[in-house]
Image (tube, grey):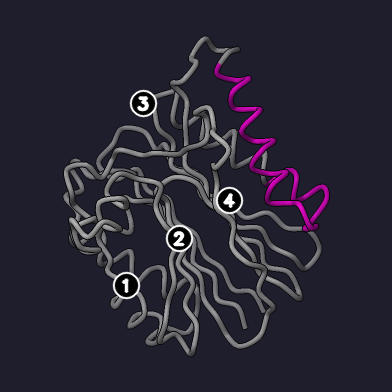
Amino acid sequence: MIDAAKLSNPGGRDNNEDYVTIAEHGNDRCFILCDGLGGHECGEVASSSVAEDVARLFEEKGDYATFLDDAFNMAQENLLALQKEKNLVNAMKTTLVVLVVTDTIMKWAHIGDSRLYRFFDKGKKYQRTRDHSMVQVLCDMGEITEKDMRHHEERNKLLRVMGSEWSSKSYDKSAILERGDKQAFALMTDGFWEYVEEEEMMKLLSKTKTAKDWMEAMAKLVFERADMSKTDNLSVICVRVD
């Protein structure tokens, strides 16, 4: 069984540049989360364009060996073309996280600082995607801690996103995992993960029964801790796989 819930809130901003959606193809699911960059009518257009491109490809063809590569490359090409069409070259950008869950496998890919968390071993262990950001580099170098990343002054400086010209290395992909024991995933924009620590994610996962309950428990912490008069857009997709 695949149990999922999603939330996207503008936070303290006038418009919501985040975009979340779930695509279906038979029993298979594709979970997509974006955090647009570039301001009104730039970030929100970029995030919706990229997310809907990925969703459309999945709904048409389902999962296949090169789906993630095709989805990221197609969405990137379309976004660059849209920039030129609107005379907004290098202005419309977005992060992207994609999780695919089929009857037999699970896999994901990402670019930017929106994260995917995977919880396994009965929810007692986790792994997360590595941010493509300056603060991730500082953390890797040992200059700041993992906890420092959440509110560091350089946290908005991204190194790789959709809508910027790519070098040979752009998005990162996971290994392909077989569906086995119960697992859970959380896809989050930085406006969400900044306010919930990993130990809390695992604790709330263990205390809840559904993806919606888990999502709402984490969101409660975010809304309590964030200054909702000025905080960034915040979005999450929670997935429990049995």
Of helix, strand and loop, which mostly describes the magenta segment? helix
Observer-side mark, 2 or 4, equals 2
Disc number placed over residue 198 in the picture, else none: 1
Disc number placed over residue 21 in the picture, else none: 4
Answer left or right for 108 relative to 214: right
> Mark 3 is on which residue type?
Gly
Disc number placed over residue 39 in the picture, else none: 3
Answer left or right for 1 relative to 146: right
> Mark 1 is on which residue type?
Glu
Observer-side mark, 2 or 3, equals 2
Residue drawn 16% across and 43% down?
153
Q: Compared to 103, does 229 lie above or below?
A: above
Answer left or right for 76 relative to 150: right
Q: Disc 2 designates what residue?
A: 129
Residue drawn 62% across and 83% down?
242
Look at the numbered disc 2 and give the secondary structure of its residue.
loop
Q: Residues within 10 Å of mark 2 (few under 14, many from 20)?
A: many
